[in-house]
Amino acid sequence: MEEEIQFIVDTAKENMELALKHLDKEMLNIRAGKANPIMLSGVKVDYYGTPTPLSQVANVNSPDGRTLTVQPWEKAMLSEIEKAILVANLGLNPMNNGESIIINIPVLTEERRRELAKLAKAEAESAKISIRAARKDANTEIKNSDISEDLQKNFEIDIQNITDQYISKADKTFSLKEKEILTV
């Protein structure tokens, strides 16, 4: 019985860890001023009918802090890549020069910084919701197990402590990103 409860707790921890990893990944996609090839990591290009990550059809580089260049492996993909970047709604304006795509990263305005901070906060809240859902699932499984009420309460307290730790980590991730975004 103890092993079953420990498995439930471990599963909850694992799900909470996944929520934090997802939060970290999403925070990387929120740009904070300088050009970074990771900014285009979520862009999917229609590669002969198949949605394909941009990194699998082109090289993405950052020659300086304000520019990204996308060098497709096939010239025929230039317009598809350009369209995919626009559709991704990243607030970027790609320019096609016939050889590659150049993206000038605009300096963030105060208003845009605040929008990005709100976006980061929404991602952090989403992660916290996932963490709480993992807690709820674990508590439900513990209640459905046939152990004494005292043990159930003890494990629920343990799971709540773990939940608090992961929510604190999500808040810390957000505050670091917010500071990065709002720093001019």
Image (cartoon, rainbow, N blue to C red):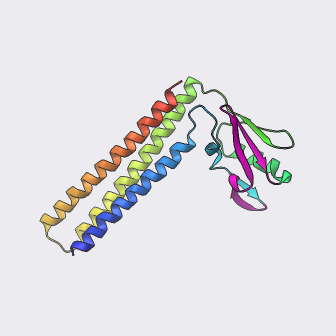
**Residue at horizontal 20%, vertical 56%?**
157
Left or right: 124 with respect to 93?
left
Q: Residue at x 23, y 67 (%)?
A: 143
Q: Is 56 contained in the magenta span?
A: yes
| Residue 106, percent from left and from top | 67, 29
Q: What residue is shown at x 61% (from left), y 45% (from top)?
A: 38
Relative to 164, is 13 above or below? Answer: below
Residue 164 in the figure: left or right of residue 180: left
Question: What is the quadrant of the C terminus in the image?
Answer: top right
Give the residue at the far front of this rendering.
63
Q: Nearer the viewer, residue 131 or 58?
A: 58
Quarter of the picture holding the N terminus: bottom left
Q: Is residue 141 above or below residue 129?
A: below
Q: Where residue 105 sits: x, y (%)?
A: 67, 32
- The percent coordinates of residue 71 (x first, y second) are 78, 46
Q: In the shown orientation, is residue 85 left or right of residue 109? A: right
Q: Is residue 152 above or below residue 81?
A: below
Magenta stretch, overall SS: strand
Please state the horizontal and vertical placement of residue 16, each as a whole percent of the image: 38, 56
25 w.r.t. 184: above or below: below
Q: Indicate yes or no whether the magenta region holds residue 49.
A: yes
Q: What is the tally of numbered marks visible in this picture?
A: 0
Provide the residue span drawn in magenta: 48-73
For this rendering, which residue is in front, 41 or 126? 41
